[in-house]
Amino acid sequence: MRAVAQFDVHLNPTESARDGFPYLVVLQSDQLNHLPTRLVMPLQRLDHSPTDMPRRLSQSVLVEGEKLHLAAHQCAALPARALRHPVTSIISQKDVVRDALDAVISGI
């Protein structure tokens, strides 16, 4: 099984969901690459920032020049084999990703 690096961004393997959620970012530590699944967070395409969500759950990242919103409350495990070649890495934006995930786990 090939390695899938933490904070790599992959095209959403569910083609029917790509309009709203074009990409998934890998959250799982590289130390767990031996597992057959990967914890991922969807990156959501929105016309504007969600105003009904707390700040930590409405943050955005840049992927291929597009502003996408972190859907931390929709994280899921996927088979690693479903994730093809990464489009890019958002490791430089990892603090924003971790903050959104922490908001889901620890509370706003």
Image (spheres, rainbow, N blue to C red):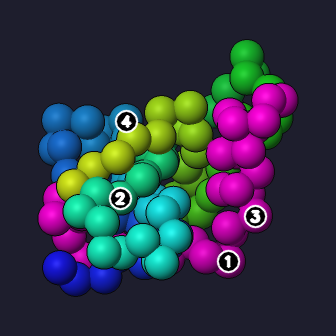
Q: Amino acid at mark 2?
A: Arg
Residue located beneath label 4 in the image? 20
Residue located beneath label 1 in the image? 92
Mark seen at residue 38: 2
**Camera-side residue of 49 and 30:** 30
The image quarter in which residue 14 lies = top left
Which of the two labelled residues, at mark 4 and mark 2, occupies the earlier sequence position?
4
Q: Residue furthest bottom?
A: 2
Which of the two labelled residues, at mark 3 and mark 4, occupies the earlier sequence position?
4
Mark seen at residue 95: 3
- Please tell me whether mark 4 or mark 2 is closer to you in this view: 2
CA–CA distance in space, label 1 to label 4 = 24 Å
Mark 1 Cα shell of 10 Å, populated few (<14), some (14-19), many (≥20)? few
- State left or right for residue 49 relative to residue 18: right
CA–CA distance in space, label 3 to label 1 = 8 Å
Quick one: quadrant of the N terminus? bottom left
Quick one: quadrant of the C terminus? top right
In the rendered image of this protein, does residue 27 appear above or below residue 17? Answer: below
CA–CA distance in space, label 3 to label 2 = 19 Å
Q: Residue at x 29, y 57 (%)?
A: 37
In the rendered image of this protein, does residue 36 appear above or below residue 52? Answer: below
Q: Position of residue 106 (x, y in %)?
A: 78, 36
Which of the two labelled residues, at mark 3 and mark 2, occupies the earlier sequence position?
2
Which of the two labelled residues, at mark 1 and mark 2, occupies the earlier sequence position?
2
Q: Position of residue 102 (x, y in %)?
A: 73, 45
